[in-house]
Image (cartoon, rainbow, N blue to C red):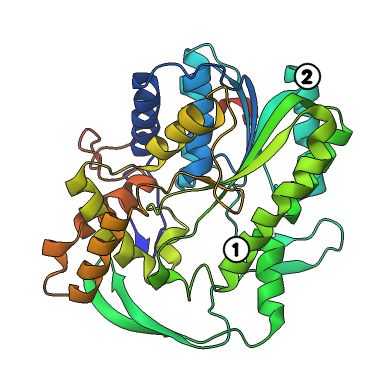
Amino acid sequence: MIIQPRVRGFICLTSHPEGTAEHVKQQIAYVKSKGKIENGPKKVLVIGASTGFGLASRITAAFGSDASTIGVFFEKPAAPGKPGTAGWYNSAAFEQEANQAGLYAKSINGDAFSDEVKKQAIELIKQDLGQVDLVVYSLASPRRTHPKTGVAHSSVLKPINQPFTNKTVDFHAGVISDISIQPVESDDDIENTIAVMGGEDWKFWIEELKAANVLADGLKTVAYSYIGPELTYPIYRNGTIGKAKDDLEATVPVLNDLLADLNGISYVSVNKALVTQSSSAIPVVPLYISLLYKVMKEKGIHEGTIEQIQRLFAERLYTGAAPALDDKGRIRVDDLEMREDVQAEVAKLWEQATTENLEEISDIAGYRNEFFHLFGFNFSNVDYEADTNEVVEVPSIKG
């Protein structure tokens, strides 16, 4: 079928198998161009492996360290006349590239919050790898059915205590407007968001993996977080999502105690603001990112998702020494984003930004391009007018 982008708000309803494969190949090529990561991981479980930071982690482990990887994700497979999700196609392309390179790669498609999928992952590790030496936790989901209580929790994106009003942008139309978001009505909104996006499920994974004896001595486990600039604090870091990130980060000492007898360690890595399916949904953030990209590209310090994760692995996690941590015990690879000169220029542009000057003072065009790249569109070497085979299978979960 001929697949064109169909967009509704911050979501693209279609994805292109050849375009997503091209995106994966470009990320692999970048990791390979940086050379091997000395003393990198060799047997890796990535929870949330199909898009964004999770996919970049899987690519970096495999093609930067020749690691065997197991990826867990929840994606819609392709069917005749119905394209699969971008994450499905990403995973298919990754496995195909890994197999061609002689690397072990298998995947599990299911609800990573569930006990059933945890058991599947444990059995696959036991069967094929024995133990893993790195567990990456990179889930991004709006909902979670708690595996112990059966309660369905939904996260919300809201400020706390008072309404939030600021600029935002429709990045498709290039129109800047003001947006107002009302605060949470009760603590239930906060608790539900923590239940979905906090650290409990990461802890459940590590507890069950350890109990099954599939964690290697010296294991590392890492989850991803974000802080961002003060202008986004009310809606992000000081809002409901920020409370969940606080909970995620507070899980680190708990896991370190749990892993002490294995000489294991856990980290939260605070990453840069990037165009992802999740960040596109957050008001204010697309405008901030488009301004940030403009400034960082002009300074020659811009990084995309794969550049961020390759640097995390090569310059933080696997240097042979313990990584430098901030005063709250976090790895910071948002260091370039949060440089004083960068933030000062972004803040200045933020005040100036209007619909009329947006194209000139921001990289909104780059933002749009990266958004469509997430779904396999806007690659110059892919013919989007041509018929393509939408039924692409992930080799390890065929049938």
Percent position of residue 253, x then y = 74, 48
Q: Is residue 111 above or below residue 206?
A: below
Residue at left 54%, top 41%? 54
Residue bearing the label numbered 2: 130
Answer few, some or many: residues within 10 Å of disc 2's Cα (few below 14, many 20 plus, some between 14 and 19): some
Q: Nearer the viewer, residue 220 or 277?
A: 220
Looking at this rendering, what residue extends furthest in the front direction? 327
Res 333 → quadrant: top left
Looking at this rendering, what residue extends furthest in the top direction? 102
Residue at left 58%, top 19%? 67
Q: Nearer the viewer, residue 87 or 222?
A: 222
Q: Is residue 174 left or right of residue 103?
A: left
Q: Nearer the viewer, residue 286 or 17?
A: 286
Q: Secondary structure at mark 2?
A: loop
Answer few, some or many: residues within 10 Å of disc 1's Cα (few below 14, many 20 plus, some between 14 and 19): some
Res 140 → quadrant: bottom right
Residue bearing the label numbered 1: 142
Percent position of residue 220, x then y = 67, 32
Tell me whether the residue at label 2 lies in contact with that at label 1, contact meaning CB atoms closer than 8 angstroms: no
Q: Is residue 108 left or right of residue 214?
A: left
Q: What amino acid is labelled 2 in the image?
A: Gly
Residue at left 47%, top 21%? 64
Q: What amino acid is labelled 1 in the image?
A: Pro
Q: Is residue 21 above or below residue 372?
A: above
Residue 80 badge: none
Residue 163 makes an appearance in the image: yes
Q: Is residue 390 left or right of residue 145?
A: left
Q: Secondary structure at mark 1?
A: loop
Res 242 → quadrant: bottom right
Q: Is residue 264 left or right of residue 334?
A: right
Percent position of residue 76, x then y = 56, 47
Quadrant placement of the C terminus:
top right
